[in-house]
Image: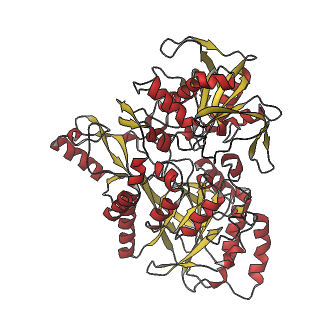
Amino acid sequence: MRALRSYFLHAVTLVLVLPLLSACSHPEPTSSRAPFELHIAHINDTHSAFDPIASGFQAPLTNSKLNAYTEFGGHPRLLTRIDTIRRDAEQAGKNLLFLHGGDAWQGSGYFLLNEGRMNADILNRLGLDAMALGNHEFDLDNARLNAFIEQVNFPVLAANLDASGDADLKEQENLRPFVVFAFDEKGQKTPVSQLNQLPEGQQYVGVLGVVLDDMPNIAPNTGDVRFFEMVSSAQATVDTLKAAGVQHIVAVTHIGLGLDQKLASEVNGIDVIVGGHSHTLLGDFTDLNWGNQGEYAQQVVNPNGQTRTCIVQAGQYAQAMGLVKIRFDAAGNVEACDGNNTLLMGERFYTQQTLLPSELFEPTTHADIAQFIQDHKQAKSVAEAPSLRKHIDETYKPALEASYGQLLGFVPKTIMHVRRPGDNGSDAHGSELAPLVAYAQYRWFLRPEVQQVTGRVPDFALVGAGGIRTELQQGELREGNIRLEMLPFASHLSIVSLTGAQVEELLTEVITQTLPLSAHAGKFPYGGNLRYTFEAEGNTGRITQLEVNRGSLHQPDWQPLQADARYQVVTSGYSAAGNDGWHAMYRAQQHHSDRLDVVLEAGAPSVYPVARVAQTEDGKRVTEYQSASPDCQQETTNCAVDALAVIAFLRDEHTCLQALPYPVVTLNR
């Protein structure tokens, strides 16, 4: 493995390595130049979704379109599915890889309780060949990331970073730029640890990792890891692999579909991109009312105008697995690329999302739905692997269930969440949950104990859709559903003054970034006590309505924002620093800020005044405080104010546990 460490370099250095490869004493190995067929099973953005998620779909039966509910995904279903794919490949002598497009971390109470250890344990049981390094793998610190990479039984890939200066990651040999697999004529694969020791007469597949080059801007806990521009780094790595005789190249990336398409159009030699980050379920799922986010296995022409790259991605939360087949001609060029994502569904179908036995469809209708799913090309009823289900239930679930805390009530109807209006069959108003979260956080700053320490009266709140990880499902709601699942990032809240013009600039800038269907939409902004309308024209547009509520929730009095008036804006500490594309928030504070960050200390609100927001050379946004900064590691300090504010609102004020009575976001396209 140490031989690979010499390639763990900046792209410029990789270019310098190329002449050395050709001049060394090891000749290029003789590889098979026959046509080649490669199958890749893939997942991404699984986000600790070890248990299935109850969700709905539409079943267009002969006489009607039924709304039905079942379980989707979970890692025991992933295991059943990949075992089936693997068994079929072995019997047919197919060449198969199983790849993960990154962001295995975060997303559920399992992660918060086990801090990556459970992720390593469960992923090791799936038999992955490699995984891209996602931005959420940096959510804790590099010591715990290093422990995760050390524990997993597959390489974690990133060709455009350098960890040699990071105290925790510098000796980690399982964090690599690429890995090479040799396939024999029977489909048996062998990982090759050294480029100058490729076995003779076999087909070689190189798998390289590509991560976000602006990682410090989206993942603040990157330590002393350096990140480099994606295109030049990827091209240099491809050239290195090609010079060594590796004729087939796969990039496993965590940069989002839009940047995958850009990478394919600017780099020669990548045959397949297995992506992640944008949570894009490629394929047409409109008959299930799951939308259509783009063509699966779309092909992009490389800059040489001759070769092509095939792009795939498989959604989110372990709900689906993709399987793509790539056929190469004897020269190693992509001849054809096809396949599909498959939604992994339960075997029982219900009339309500609570999935109670009494809510099962009657036998005839149930059989019709089951037959519809059985015949569907992109959805399958898949049983959970019993051994993995038992392992999760016995080893990890008791502690999870014990941590859910106080009962808040019963959610009468699922409060839906999507990142961007129009996604997953939603309308122009998008998420029902994000405005509720924003309104709850706005209301928290009106509580007397908070007013006493801030001296501020909030006008409205803004939330980024990606900070909300689940919808609020119909049924019993406990504090842990919010703190461990829905808002797991444990972020303090901030209040900062912005002019009306700055608010409009912020919304326009962030929304515009999310308009391409291939864009990462986690930054999309929703308001609480604020409403807006955005008229899109292609991938640009403008705000046509922007109003603040001067009345109450149920008797609103909407007034236009004034460009030169100042407003007290509540948001998460992450967004308040201008992270993830909220650049206007950074610009408003780069010289001076009146922002107050609020945490709980010994159960009471405590304020930390901010002096300014700085930006480092690598793009990382750093909040500089007037004096001390919050210490979230102290036992008496609770920084998870984002979740606590919502819990307090639902417990004390909004006990009906329903969505807001009107939409506050309209995106017209």
Q: Is residue 375 left or right of residue 186?
A: left
Residue 291 visible, this angle: no
Q: Is residue 612 left or right of residue 348?
A: right
Residue 166 position within the rendered picture, expressed as x and y whole percent measured from the top left: 73, 63
Residue 541 position within the rendered picture, expressed as x and y whole percent measured from the top left: 64, 28
Residue at 50%, 56% (x, y): give it. 114
Residue at 66%, 53% (x, y): give it. 212
Q: Is residue 333 left or right of residue 79?
A: right
User: Can you tell which quarter of the image residue 562 is in?
Assistant: top right
**Dividing the image into 4 quarters, which one contains the C terminus?**
top right
User: Can you tell which quarter of the image residue 511 is in?
Assistant: top right
Residue 519 position within the rendered picture, expressed as x and y whole percent measured from the top left: 60, 43
Question: Which residue is the extreme one toward the right?
Answer: 591
**Dividing the image into 4 quarters, which one contains the N terminus?**
bottom right
Residue 394 visible, this angle: yes
> Would you place residue 397 above or below residue 446 in this image?
below
Between 575 and 336, the residue placed more toward the observer is 575
> Would you place residue 47 above or below residue 208 in this image?
above
